[in-house]
Image (cartoon, grey):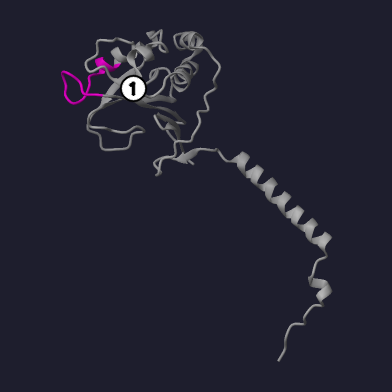
Amino acid sequence: MWSAPIAPASSVVESHPQYVLRRIVTILGAGIFAVLTGCAHDSGVQMLGTDPISWHGRTRLPSGQSVASLNAEANSSASGPTRRARAIFTLFAHHIRPGCSAAEVHMVLTETKWMGESKLTGIGGLAGWVPVDMESKDTVFVWKLFPVETDKGWTIYFRLTGAGQTKYPEREVSDALAFLRGEATIFGRPNIEEFALCEYQEHGSKVRIERFGRKGICVYKWPP
């Protein structure tokens, strides 16, 4: 019966220096691979519609621009719809926090003339997925920024707490507009409980959503 020859012990046993060198090369190779794959991976981003939700994402909108300059850009027709919409997104991402009152939001959205160029609607009974929670006691609104001027979808979803006074249980669009303008006489004194900044590109074939809640930021991307 044939059997494979057994190698001499000297050919299968490494000397201590050889073993140490091999281990160093292996560890360095693994470290370089981890760095390279880590750099290529978009940390904190998850596929649209996946569970469970990770609240450890980060906004990619740059910080450092003042509230005054962002408001000025949002209202400047010379800036173009994309820059104006990005300025509004940046105001939300870096200066508005879930749980803010109307007065606190008004300290950020100080000049709201641009609202007349955007479309705000309320979401009632809806069969489908939206990037914020649909709570029976609250109302969700969808806000399309400059829909006439741009084919890119710059859209904000946000949820106001509490029921409305005249159209129970949903709040009216007039309530949302009053809230965003900082009016203090809104029934029930609502807060903005959460919001999502949605950027659709190439006729909706690509989407990035940054959802801001009390637990942190959840970032969705499609395609992954």
**Callout 1: SS:** strand
> Is residue 168 highlighted in magenta?
yes
Q: Tell me: residue 41, above or below residue 104.
A: below
Q: Tell me: residue 126, above or below residue 12.
A: above
Res. 55 image quadrant:
top left
> Is residue 17 highlighted in magenta?
no
Left or right of 10: which side holds 33? left
**Residue found 47% across the figure and 15% down from its top:** 84
Left or right of 108: which side holds 125? left
Instruction: Residue at the far front: name it.
Output: 16
In depth, the one of 84 and 2 nearer the eye is: 2
Q: What residue type is labelled 1?
A: Ile
Res. 178 image quadrant:
top left
**Residue found 75% across the figure and 56% down from its top:** 23
Q: What span is colored magenta in the figure?
A: 162-176
**Residue found 51% across the figure and 9% down from its top:** 69
Q: Tell me: residue 55, above or below residue 60.
A: below
Instruction: Residue at the far bottom: name it.
Output: 1
Res. 102 image quadrant:
top left
Question: Label 1, on which residue?
Answer: 192
> Percent x, y for residue 17?
83, 59
Q: In which quarter of the image is the N terminus?
A: bottom right
> Percent x, y for residue 61?
52, 24
> Percent x, y for residue 193?
33, 25
In depth, the one of 50 and 13 nearer the eye is: 13
> Percent x, y for residue 21?
80, 56
